[in-house]
Image: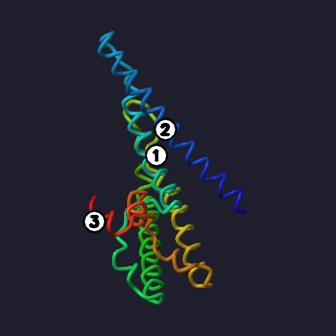
């Protein structure tokens, strides 16, 4: 099962790269065509925008798995174990609630987006905004998994702090107090 999950997220990482490469090619190609040849490809403007939307949401899923989202852990690090568990529980529960609302909102807009056709490309806008189904579902599964791990006691204390330290702060913590004071 772990291999399937890893493969899924490798696919998501590939899609992020593919969207980014497609955006660069379309935008750069259009700039060259407009500057050099006084023409352009009208589809590239719209498709690069759509790639950016998908890139953002797919990147958010990958970042959530890697605990790469921004966060403030100043208070949580100072709490005792029970406090860290409560904060983790509340945080995951609130994120799960947001994902449910995100999925429900996408569901509510589904009928409108199916009948809404993009002006240049001519595809149904559900292909663009339907990423809300994927993102909300994947993130909700990750939230539920974290809650199950917490409630069954399979999380270590360091797993309860959801912010990954930057390399700079880890390097600063490794310095002795005398050296840190001179920098």
Residue pictured at 38% horizontal, 27% vertical: 27
Residue pictured at 32% horizontal, 64% vertical: 180
* Residue closer to the observer: 159 or 98: 159
Q: Which mark is residue 19?
A: 2
Instruction: Where is residue 112? Give x, y as percent.
Output: 40, 51
Residue pictured at 62% horizontal, 84% vertical: 152
Instruction: Give the mark nearer the N terminus: 3 vs 1.
Output: 1
Q: Residue furthest front?
A: 178
Mark 3 or mark 1: which is in front? 3
Q: Secondary structure at mark 3?
A: helix
- Please say if 130 is above or below 121: below
| Among the 4 quarters of the image, the one containing residue 36 | top left
Label 1: few (<14), some or many (≥20) within 10 Å?
many
- Whether the residues at callouts 1 and 2 have beta carbons within 8 Å, the answer is yes
Q: Which mark is residue 181?
A: 3
| Among the 4 quarters of the image, the one containing residue 3 | bottom right
- Please say if 13 is above or below 1: above
Q: Where does label 1 land, which residue?
A: 54
Mark 1 or mark 2: which is in front? 2
């Amino acid at each position: 099962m772990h291999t399937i999950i890893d493969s899924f997220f490798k696919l998501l990482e590939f899609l992020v790269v593919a969207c980014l490469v497609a955006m660069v090619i379309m935008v750069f190609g259009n700039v060259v065509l407009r500057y050099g040849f006084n023409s352009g490809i009208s589809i590239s403007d719209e498709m690069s925008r759509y790639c950016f939307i998908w890139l953002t949401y797919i990147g958010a899923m990958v970042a959530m798995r890697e605990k790469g989202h921004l966060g403030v852990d100043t208070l949580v690090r100072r709490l005792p174990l029970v406090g860290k568990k409560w904060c983790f529980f509340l945080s995951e529960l609130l994120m799960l609630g947001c994902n449910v609302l995100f999925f429900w909102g996408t569901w509510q807009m589904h009928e409108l987006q199916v009948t809404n056709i993009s002006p240049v490309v001519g595809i149904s806008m559900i292909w663009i905004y339907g990423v809300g189904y994927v993102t909300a579902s994947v993130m909700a599964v990750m939230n539920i998994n974290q809650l199950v791990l917490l409630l069954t006691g399979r999380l270590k204390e360091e797993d309860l702090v959801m912010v990954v330290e930057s390399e700079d702060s880890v390097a600063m913590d490794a310095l002795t107090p005398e050296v840190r004071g001179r920098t």
